[in-house]
Image (spheres, grey):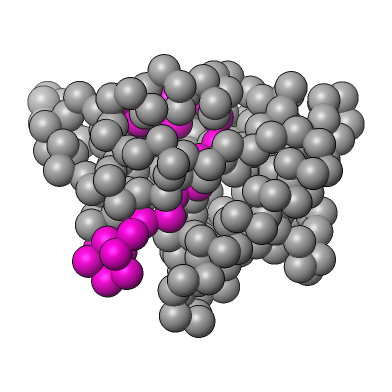
């Protein structure tokens, strides 16, 4: 007689650069990533007086931001001390755009001051102004701590991370640049070189639609090397996957 309490086998953890956390469901994934963001925010505000959060667009990022608004356990997140930076913006964003997430969820419901929401504006002048504003804001911190505290991003269908041009500008020293990927529109985005200095990089992927992409990234040395350009030099890079994305 079969054991009615027999447990399902643990999923095989894909060989991705960084830490990999596999959750049972997409809802669990969002909760785990939101909890890590919350802890990082409270820790950084306690240590530095503020919390620098960079956000990309996407369905999971949208749902996570909504979770932060409605879940009582995240209600005390210190939004008045958050500096919110758009990590990528352009005509080719996958899923809900980051500006849409900011406008419809965070701007009016989080309590974050409008002056602490930093949007990317098109054109070279806008890129330069944004880069200057970002570096000046981080420059108030002690050297070595002048970096983003948390980057929230998802995998795009083409394997890029939140529209960021992987493999480009890894060592270029530029903070924000303009990308035009194959088959994609033009976009402004933070560079892998800059994001590699982040304190915590959270990468989200879920569902059967992500399974082939996760398998490809894990199996291809070229793809792993490309995405490894985002590995924080002295920080955490954590993948949040649900079982559907890896089984």
- Give the image location of residue 2, x and y in percent: 15, 26
Residue at (82%, 26%) from the top-left corner? Answer: 184
Q: Is residue 229 left or right of residue 6?
A: right
Q: In this orientation, which residue lies closer to the viewer: 206 or 87?
A: 87
Q: Is residue 81 left or right of residue 246?
A: left
- Give the image location of residue 67, x and y in percent: 27, 28
Residue found farthest to the front? 115
- Give the image location of residue 65, x and y in percent: 35, 30
Residue found farthest to the bottom? 143
Image quarter for residue 149? bottom left
Quadrant into which the N terminus falls = top left
The stretch of residues the image draws in magenta is 43-66
Residue at (73%, 23%) from the top-left corner? Answer: 92
Q: In this orientation, which residue lies closer to the viewer: 75 or 154?
A: 75
Q: Is residue 76 above or below residue 131?
A: above
Image quarter for residue 228? bottom right
- Give the image location of residue 209, x and y in percent: 56, 21
Q: Is residue 18 left or right of residue 52?
A: right
Residue 36 visible here:
no
Q: Is residue 46 magenta?
A: yes
Residue 84 visible here:
yes
Q: Is residue 54 magenta?
A: yes
Q: Is residue 14 above or below residue 42?
A: above
Q: Is residue 138 above or below residue 161?
A: below
Residue at (70%, 49%) from the top-left corner? Answer: 129
Residue at (15%, 43%) from the top-left corner? Answer: 76
Q: How many numbered dots are placed on residues in this image? A: 0
């Amino acid at each position: 007689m079969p054991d009615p309490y027999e447990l399902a086998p643990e999923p095989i953890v894909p060989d991705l650069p960084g830490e990999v956390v596999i959750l049972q469901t997409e809802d669990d994934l969002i909760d785990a990533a939101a909890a890590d963001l919350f802890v990082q925010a409270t820790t950084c505000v306690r240590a530095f007086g503020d919390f620098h959060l960079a956000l990309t667009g996407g369905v999971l990022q949208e749902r996570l931001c909504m979770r932060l608004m409605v879940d009582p356990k995240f209600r005390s997140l210190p939004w008045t001390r958050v500096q919110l930076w758009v990590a990528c913006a352009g005509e080719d964003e996958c899923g809900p755009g980051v500006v849409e997430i900011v406008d419809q969820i965070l701007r009016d419901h989080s309590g974050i001051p409008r002056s602490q929401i930093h949007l990317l504006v098109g054109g070279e002048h806008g890129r330069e102004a944004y880069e200057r504003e970002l570096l000046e804001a981080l420059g108030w911190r002690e050297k070595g701590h002048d970096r983003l505290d948390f980057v929230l991003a998802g995998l795009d269908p083409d394997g890029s991370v939140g529209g960021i041009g992987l493999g480009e500008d890894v060592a270029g020293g530029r903070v924000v640049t303009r990308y035009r990927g194959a088959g994609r529109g033009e976009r402004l985005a933070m560079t892998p070189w800059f994001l590699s200095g982040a304190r915590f990089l959270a990468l989200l992927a879920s569902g059967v639609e992500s399974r082939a992409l996760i398998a490809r990234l894990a199996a291809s040395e070229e793809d792993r090397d490309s995405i490894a350009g985002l590995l924080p030099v002295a920080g955490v890079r954590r993948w949040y996957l649900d079982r559907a994305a890896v089984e």
